[in-house]
Image (cartoon, grey):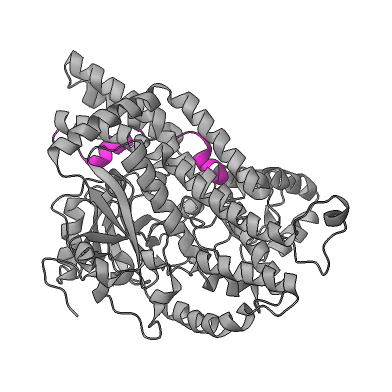
Amino acid sequence: MNAPTDRFPYLHEAKAPAGAEGWERMYPYFLISQPEGRDFEQERFWFADSMHWSRAVHPFDSIGAEAVYYGCGVNGARSIVLPAALGLDVRMVNGFVYICPQAVSDPAEIQRRLALFQERAGHYYKNWDALYANWKEKMTVAIDRMRSLEFAALPEIEPIEVVTEGQGRSVSWDLVENYHRLVNDFFLVWQYHFEMLGLGYGAYLVFFDLCKKAFPEIQDQTIARMVAGVEGMAFRPDDELRRLAKLAVELKVDPAINPDDTADTVLANIAKQGNGAQWLAALDEIRDPWFNYFAEYGFLHDQETWNENLSIPFQAIARYIELLRNGEVIDRPVEKLHEDRDEIVAEYRALLAPEEAKAFDEALALSRNVFPYIEEHNIYVEHWSHAVFWRKVRELANVFVAAGFFREAEDFYFLNRFEIDQALFDMVESWAIGVPARGAQHWAHEIDARRKIMAALRTKTAAPAYGTPPNEVTDPFAIMNYGVTTERVQQWLAQTRGGNATALQGIAASPGVVEGIVRVIRHENEISDLQPGEILVAAITAPSWASAFSVVAGVVTDIGGLMSHAAIVCREYGMPAVVSTGFATTQLKTGQRIRIDGYKGTVEQLAA
């Protein structure tokens, strides 16, 4: 049904794709729109988190939606105590994740929370370096703890040590216990994830607001460029690809790195080269940890790390080698970014009175100090911890297959985490008693049905939003990370009413104007299809797609704010970009010609 023009469709009005009817039963009840909560849901605004889940989510993978927004709420609403924002509520719609910012509107309550926020944020800002070092240590411990968990197949008979050492407990219980430990640590790292992220955005927002008040005509993007030139580990994986490309050319093994070959073929061909052993040694040296890096964001079990699919980094290395052969410089333009950054800062600072300049300097210094965290936390959480988590989940799935409970490991992911808990106990108890597990038959038909539902859900992309637009968007995560601002919501709404069919409006994320042919990317496996000079169009780009920026002329995304990974990476690589268009992947088609304006945030469809 069509929604009134003053709102988006309500959650319960969303129509399931053909063949996906009954999708709701796959997910925990609290992630689904329910009749008893309809009035609450209809009054609120829900937007797609296609940044982290660019396609429909398997039942087990919905654990991410639970962990992310629990951690976000705990830290933003209850720990740091953001003055005007609580947490982000979450729902699943047709397999996609939607979130809803919870604003604080009572001025008295905002003032009460502001006093709490200033005390708590002040402590973090004052001790940022020490607390950040402590954060890294906590994350490393949690990742190592997950890595140490074992999921061994059920034995025919308990090991003799169970008896001789008087252990008094079955090794089968390790499966149950370790599953709970794995889930618990997954939730824990997501609490760590948000411990300092809101403060990182907060420091930038303070600087942003100061600039807007002092320079009313300044562009949002210009403010963002004042903190450009990020140093640190966030860009290390791509830096390592560039280094390996240079080394391959230097050692004259580059002819062996053909982007059309399989990884095994590339490795075999390099080994035959005179200096191949030296290059392979350099590769082995950096694979752990820098190739524990997902091609996308690592929220879905069917996403791969570079280590799991070496073809992904090898294709990127081949791109860089081709540029080197053409005499081009492949280094990230950090010096140029610093020069531009410092020139912009000096230009605007000169317009301020001494007291204003002092406040400007302090806000800028704080923003630059905390800014690396906005990118670096992604390495620890979405990549390193998720890589370990999904590897351990696969080990447990294989235990189910070995026990005859599931026919194949992929069956595991068609159950949500609570259903897996039931299935796990069924498996170990049946093994202990010596009877067939009831779940082998109980789940077989349902898994077959869910497999068809998932296939249908994945034929669609996420609608940008549902519900009633807010009078004002105040949540810092929604604004800075997702690009969901009051203005953008109204533009999305206008688009759903049948706005300009040849133009899209988004956020000007990275400067430059460029024309080119569209390449719509819906899956990270399609990155290799990009051709030189094309404009990459996607729901969102991942930091790991950086090497693709050496090929494309520009980037357009459905979602993303000025501080989203996509926007930051595009600025760091000097790539024109427009983010948060809402409809780019549905309205643009591969092969179309478009013009993007990274200053104005516009995307214009051109005649062929």
Q: Give residue 7's quadrant in the image.
A: bottom left
Say which of 313 and 515 sits in front: 313
Q: What residue is at 16 percent from the left and 68 percent from the top?
A: 500
Q: Quadrant of the C terminus?
A: bottom left
Q: Give residue 497's quadrant in the image.
A: bottom left
Q: Which residues are magenta?
A: 216-238
Say which of 58 and 307 sits in front: 58
Q: Is residue 57 magenta?
A: no
The residue lying furthest to the top in this view is 354
Instruction: Where is residue 293? Give x, y as percent.
Output: 57, 51
Instruction: Where is residue 274? Give x, y as percent.
Output: 81, 50
Task: Determine if residue 217 is in view.
Answer: no
**Left or right side of 159 for 175:** left
Q: Is residue 102 above or below residue 411?
A: above
**Left or right side of 256 for 442:** left
Task: Determine if residue 77 is in view.
Answer: yes
Instruction: Where is residue 179? Give x, y as percent.
Output: 61, 58
Q: What residue is at 23 percent from the left and 68 percent from the top?
A: 38
Say which of 362 and 334 sits in front: 362
